[in-house]
Image (cartoon, rainbow, N blue to C red):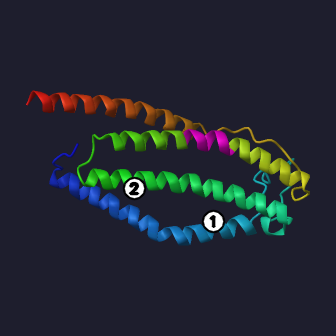
């Protein structure tokens, strides 16, 4: 359903859209920086704790170990790239006045699942990855990581709730259009 977007709202959505395009222009630089840090910084994140040894840089790992690091990197970037693509898609729809439509619900639903998947898959994959790197001899010590990304889960659940609210708003808008 298309709405007549107020001029002030159009300006806001246009600015947000421009910021997203700016982020896309920055993406290659940020990606290059992330690749550089992934391969040159010590890989084992628990190095600041007293009882844990700091691991070597991923560039010095075995070929299989480097493949595991690359897979983890691609998965992490993939999750966030998918979220940014979906968010930008929503902003572009809103800018055109397409707010209370089923595509909005579908996009919000996908974003909710991605947020929850990030939390669940990343902790499982991270622990498996660290264990395999330890078994390959690329890391000096393996210590399980138990921290669950509660913010991602909370955002996913909040988006599910928001989807329900928007669904009710769509029904109310359709009822209002039928009575006019």
Residue drawn at (33%, 39%) of the image: 102
- Residue 148 placement: quadrant: top right
Q: Residue at (74%, 65%) from the top-left corner? A: 41
Q: CA distance from mark 1 to mark 2?
A: 22 Å
The quadrant of the rendering that contains the C terminus is top left
Q: Is residue 127 above or below residue 160?
A: below
Residue 56, placed above or below residue 160: below
Name above or below for residue 77 compared with residue 109. Answer: below
Across and down, in percent, residue 134 comes to 88, 52
Residue highlighted by disc 2 = 88
Percent x, y of residue 83: 49, 51
- Name the dominant secondary structure of the magenta segment: helix
Residue 178: name its quadrant.
Answer: top left
Picture quadrant where residue 149 is located: top right
What residue sits 22% from the left and 55% below the top?
10
| Disc 1 element | helix
Which residue is at the front of the view, 153 or 70? 70
Q: Residues within 10 Å of mark 2 (few under 14, many from 20)?
A: some
User: Residue 120 magenta-drawn?
Assistant: yes
Please give left or right for residue 59 compared with residue 90 in the image: right
Looking at the image, tell me whether mark 1 or mark 2 is earlier in sequence order: 1
**x, y (%) of residue 146?**
73, 38
In the image, which is nearer the foreground, mark 1 or mark 2? 2
Q: Which mark is residue 34?
A: 1
Q: Which residues are magenta?
A: 115-122
């Amino acid at each position: 359903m298309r709405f007549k977007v107020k001029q002030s709202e159009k300006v806001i959505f246009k600015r947000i859209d421009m910021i997203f395009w700016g982020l896309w222009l920055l993406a290659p630089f940020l990606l290059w920086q992330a690749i550089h840090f992934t391969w040159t910084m010590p890989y084992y994140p628990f190095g600041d704790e007293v009882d844990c040894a700091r691991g070597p840089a991923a560039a010095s790992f075995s070929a299989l170990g480097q493949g595991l690091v690359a897979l983890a990197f691609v998965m992490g970037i993939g999750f966030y790239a998918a979220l940014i693509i979906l968010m930008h898609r929503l902003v572009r729809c809103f800018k055109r006045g397409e707010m209370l439509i089923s595509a909005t619900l579908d996009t919000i639903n996908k974003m909710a699942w991605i947020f929850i998947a990030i939390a669940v898959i990343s902790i499982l994959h991270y622990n498996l990855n660290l264990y395999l790197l330890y078994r390959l001899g690329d890391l000096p010590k393996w210590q399980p990581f138990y921290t669950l990304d509660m913010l991602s889960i909370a955002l996913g659940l909040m988006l599910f709730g928001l989807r329900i609210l928007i669904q009710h708003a769509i029904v109310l808008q359709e009822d209002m259009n039928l009575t006019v």
